[in-house]
Amino acid sequence: MRIGKYRAYSSTANLGPGFDVLGMALQAFYDEAEVRVSMNGEGKVKVRYVGPYSNQVSSFAGDCVAKRAALALLRRYRSDVDVNIVIWKGVPPGKGLGSSGASAALVVHALDDILDLGLRDEEKVLLAGEGEVASAGTPHYDNVAASLLGGLAIVSKSKTGIKVWSTKIRVMFVIAVPDVHTHHSKTKLMRSLIPDEVPLNAHVENSSYLATLLAGLLTGDLKLAGYGMSNDVIVTKARSPHVPCYAEALEAAIKAGAYGFTLSGAGPSTVALVDECSAGTVAKALEKAYSSCGVKAQVVITQVAGRPERLD
Ligand code: HSE
C-alpha cells in the first residue's frame, strides 16, 4: 500500500480576453486529498468527499470529475492498482473558481507522484481535462492547467494536440464570490451564451487586449495588464449581463483603484487585479457594492499559487 497527502489550488480562468487559453492559480481556496494505492488491484477507483463543500459537489457533477481523471490515468498507465481517494473539498463548486479542475488536477498530480509515473505536463493536463467534460460538457483545460502547473498558465489546443506553458507571476487579486444559487450545469449554460462566430474586427480587438494583458503581466506593468483584462468584446461581453451585480462590482472595483476587473471563469465570481496598496480598499468597495445590490458575497484578497504540494 502506498499513501500520500496532497493539496491543489483554485484558479481563475480567462482573465478577460483569454477564453479557454489563460488560467491563474490562486491561493484563495484549495482541495486536499489523501490517496491510498493498493499495488495489487484491477484499476478500480473510489472517491469520497469530505470538508466544507463536500455536500455541494454532486450538484455540479463534480463527483465524476476526479474519478474520471483517475480512471483515465489508471487505464492508460497502471490498470494493476486500485485507488482510494478522500478529497477534502475546499474550493466552492459552481462559482467560477476552477473547483472541478482543482479536484481533477489534485488526483492526477497525486497519482503521478505516488506511482512514480513521471508524466509530462501536457499529459497531466489532458488527463485532468477528461474530468472537466463531466461538469462543463466540453473539455477545457485552462483551469486544470493553472491548478496543475501553478502561476499563469497558457493552454494552446489544436487539432494536432495540446501545448501548455506556465510562469510564476507576482500579482494580487481580489476575488468576490457571490452567494447566489447557480444552476448545476452553469458552465454549460454560460458557454451557450457565447457566439459561435465573431466578426474579424472583434477578433482583432480582442487579440489586442490579450496581447496587452500578457505584456502587462509579464513585465509587471499592472496598468497595461488591467487594461487588457477589463476589455473583452466577445466572451465577457456576452456573459456579464447575466451575472448578478457585475456592472455594480466593476464600477466599484475600478473606482477603488483596481487595475483590472472581469468575470472569473464562467462566473458568478468576479476578479479584480490589484496591488498591495489597493487590495484592502478594493475589497471593501466590492463588499459594499454587492451588499448594496442585495447579494451577499465572500470577498478574498489572494496571491498567485504554485503547483500542487505533497503534504507528508
Ligand atoms: N474557460 C472556461 C469558461 C472556464 O469560461 O467557460 C470555466 O470555468
Image (cartoon, grey):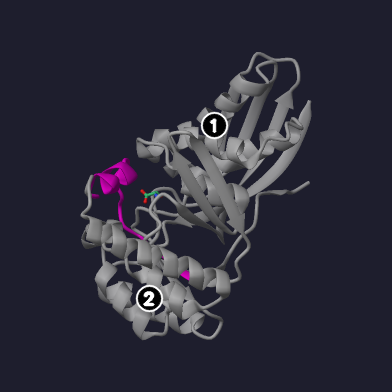
**Residue 61 found in image quarter:** top left
Q: Secondary structure at mark 2?
A: helix
Crowd class of label 2 (few under 14; some 14 to 19; many from 20; radius 10 Å): many
Label 1 crowd bin: few (<14), some (14–19), many (20+), radius 10 Å: many
Q: Is residue 108 above or below residue 148?
A: above
Q: Say what amino acid the circle numbered 2 marks.
A: Leu
The percent coordinates of residue 129 (x first, y second) are 49, 37
Q: Position of residue 290 (x, y in %)?
A: 31, 72
Return the x and y of residue 28 as percentages of the image width and height. 54, 62
- First to last magenta residue range: 173-194
Is 111 on the left or on the right of 93, as rendered? right
Q: Which residue is rendered at x = 38% and y = 40% of the image?
A: 60
- 247 vs 60, left or right, is left
Camera-nearest residue between 214 and 97: 214
For the N terminus, which image quadrant? top right
Residue 69 shows which numbered tag? Answer: 1
Quarter residue 180 falls in: bottom left
Q: Is residue 266 left or right of residue 219?
A: left
Membership of 193 in magenta stretch:
yes
Q: Which residue is mark 2?
A: 286
User: Are discs 1 and 2 less than 8 Å apart at CB?
Assistant: no
Q: CA distance from mark 1 to mark 2?
A: 36 Å
Count every numbered label the image shows and give the total.
Answer: 2
Question: Between 17 and 296, which is closer to the camera in this rendering?
Answer: 17
Q: Which amino acid type is marked by label 1?
A: Ala
